[in-house]
Image (spheres, helix red, strand yellow):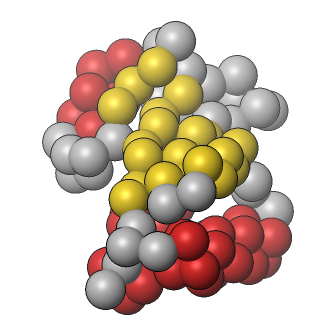
Amino acid sequence: MEKLLPSEVQEKLSSVPDWRLTDEKWIERKYRFRDYLKGIEFVNLAANLSEQVNHHPFISIDYKVVTLRISSWNARGLTALDFELALKYDEFYLQTKS
């Protein structure tokens, strides 16, 4: 995958409003859950998808808050795939948060 230009990154960020750009090469989002096990359920969904597409985010679990941070190592920055996965992770969140 091709690394996105800064203008393309800014455009893609508008499609994932709860994600933020960090260090010019990562996107990151914190997800809050009502209980610990809902967060773990979410992490399992995200991890399984990530394994299927062989593109893995950094995942941090802090009790009821799960943070995902993603970038494309081979491209040395953000690609379209990072934003596609962000959208899928957001869908998983909607499925598991209640």
Residue lying at the far top in this picture: please name it.
Answer: 23
- Image spot of residue 29 (x, y percent): 42, 44
> Along the horizontal axis of the image, is 67 left or right of 32?
right
- Image spot of residue 30 (x, y percent): 42, 47
Please, is residue 19 above or below residue 34 in the view? Answer: above
Please, is residue 22 above or below residue 74 in the view? Answer: above
> Along the horizontal axis of the image, is 25 left or right of 92?
right
> Along the horizontal axis of the image, is 38 left or right of 51?
left
- Image spot of residue 95 (x, y percent): 37, 87
Residue found 62% across the figure and 36% down from its top: 71
Nearer to me, 20 or 64: 64
Nearer to me, 22 or 72: 22
Quadrant location of the C terminus? bottom left
Please, is residue 94 above or below residue 75 in the view? Answer: below
- Image spot of residue 8 (x, y percent): 32, 30
Residue found 38% across the figure and 59% down from its top: 32
Residue found 47% across the figure and 34% down from its top: 27
Nearer to me, 76 or 63: 63
* Residue 6 shows up from this direction: yes
Residue found 42% across the figure and 84% down from its top: 96
Total marks shown come to 0
Quadrant location of the N terminus? top right
* Residue 88 shows up from this direction: no
